[in-house]
Image: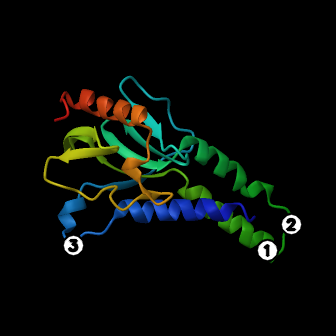
Amino acid sequence: MPRQLPVVLVLTTFLVGCGGHSDDASENASVHISTTHAESAPLKDGDVRIDVQSGGVDLALIGDTISSGLSQTTIATAARETDSSTVKGTGFGASIEKMVKSSVQKGLGTRVGFPISDIKSAAYRDGKISFDFVDGHKKVFDQAKINNKPLLESFSPADAQRFVDAVNARKGTVAR
């Protein structure tokens, strides 16, 4: 069971980081956390999903939502590693292992996001994806870090630009 701990830490760190902290509750009012199935539906025209360069986490534009969570590859790997049906034994240790694996399984598809209607446009400048929010700055992904690097600076330039272009195309805007 030692390999499950990193999955739990990545998921917990990611969710806490994306939530950020704000003294103004309205600043993150439209941020939402949702749980999806590990086997996500295929992307439709105009949808895009990019993975951070080091892997493990993605950023997606799917339908009318921009969200981030564990990448599909990470979810699939973690789902295999945390399959409680593979636990051998019936004692106390086996019960704890099943409980931990089951808890991890429930959180694997968790994503943090916001509706695309919350932004005017997206841009990629100085190695970072940024969003121009309708109601000023929101701290949606500001605290999220991947390997001590801010989430929105963790994508290859080509992927980041592809994501920004998809967001702006969906919005019908051009980045300024």
Quadrant of the image containing the C terminus: top left
Which color scheme is applied?
rainbow
Q: Is residue 103 above or below residue 160?
A: below
- Can you tell which mark lies on residue 164? none
The reply to whether discs 1 and 2 touch (Cβ–Cβ < 8 Å) is yes
The answer to whether the residues at label 3 and label 1 have Cβ atoms under 8 Å apart is no
160 horizontally vs 120: left or right: right
Element assignment for label 3 = loop
Q: Which residue is mark 3?
A: 23
Q: CA distance from mark 2 to mark 3?
A: 49 Å
Question: Which of label 2 and label 3 is nearer to you?
Answer: 3
Q: Residue at x 55, y 60 (%)?
A: 10
Q: Looking at this rendering, what residue extends furthest in the right direction?
A: 89
Query: What percent of the width, then of the height, locates residue 115?
Result: 27, 44
Q: Position of residue 28 (x, y in %)?
A: 24, 60
User: What residue sits 29% from the left and 33% below the top?
Assistant: 167
Q: Residue visible at 41% across and 31% down?
A: 158
Residue beneath label 1, please? Answer: 93
Look at label 1 and name its amino acid: Gly
Quadrant of the snapshot with the N terminus:
bottom right
Q: Residue at x 30, y 56 (%)?
A: 140
Report which residue position mark 2 lands on.
Answer: 89
Position of residue 162 in the picture relative to residue 108 (left or right): left
Q: Determine whether 119 is above or below 89 in the image.
A: above
Q: Nearer the viewer, mark 3 or mark 1?
A: 3
Q: CA distance from mark 3 to mark 1?
A: 43 Å
Furthest toward the front, the residue is: 126
The location of residue 21, given as percent across then percent down, is: 30, 69
Residue that lies at the very extreme toward the left in this rendered image: 135
